[in-house]
């Protein structure tokens, strides 16, 4: 019998690697979960869409399992983590989703 390895469903490339809901030995609500880019950032180009805060808790870190790219949620904004500095993403397509 061959053993099948678990694979993420197509499009679910963003994995939670830091979960601020963690307490003690509990891993947290989201830790290890895989999400789509549209689950992290609400789509929209207009000013009204940009004013809606990100629904994830501040401090949540997502990592793209294909590219290794990381984004952090800071005060309701999705921020690309680049080394020691962070760059706020102004448009929802600013990060690769594949």
Image (spheres, rainbow, N blue to C red):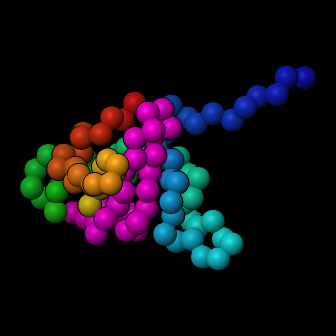
**In magenta segment, residue 68:** yes
Residue furthest to the right in view is 1
Does residue 91 sit above or below 4 in this rendering?
A: below
Locate residue 49 relative to residue 83 in the image: left or right.
left
Residue extent of the magenta highlight: 52-76
Question: How far across and how far down the image is residue 32, in percent?
Answer: 59, 53
Q: Residue at x 56, y 52 (%)?
A: 33
Q: Quadrant of the N terminus?
A: top right
Residue furthest to the top in view is 2
Question: How far across and how far down the image is residue 29, in percent?
Answer: 57, 65
Q: Nearer the viewer, residue 9 or 19?
A: 19
Residue 57 visible at all: yes
Does residue 12 sit above or below 48 in this rendering?
A: above
Q: Residue at x 40, y 47 (%)?
A: 70
**In magenta segment, residue 50:** no
Question: How far across and how far down the image is residue 74, in percent?
Answer: 31, 65
Q: Residue at x 52, y 54 (%)?
A: 17
Residue furthest to the front in view is 84
Residue 44 visible at all: no
Most common SS among magenta residues: loop
Q: Residue at x 22, y 54 (%)?
A: 88
Residue furthest to the left in view is 47
Locate residue 44 relative to residue 55 in the image: left or right.
left
Question: How far across and how far down the image is residue 44, in percent?
Answer: 19, 47
What number of labels is visible?
Answer: 0
Q: Quadrant of the C terminus?
A: top left
Give the quadrant of residue 25. Answer: bottom right
């Amino acid at each position: 019998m061959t053993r099948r390895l678990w694979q993420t469903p197509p499009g679910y490339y963003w994995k939670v690697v830091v979960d601020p809901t963690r307490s003690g030995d509990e891993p947290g609500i989201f830790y290890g979960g895989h999400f789509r880019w549209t689950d992290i950032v609400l789509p929209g180009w207009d000013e009204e869409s940009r004013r809606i805060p990100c629904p994830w808790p501040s401090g949540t870190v997502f990592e793209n399992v294909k590219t290794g790219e990381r984004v952090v949620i800071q005060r309701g904004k999705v921020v690309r983590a680049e080394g020691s500095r962070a760059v706020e993403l102004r448009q929802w397509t600013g990060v690769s989703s594949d």
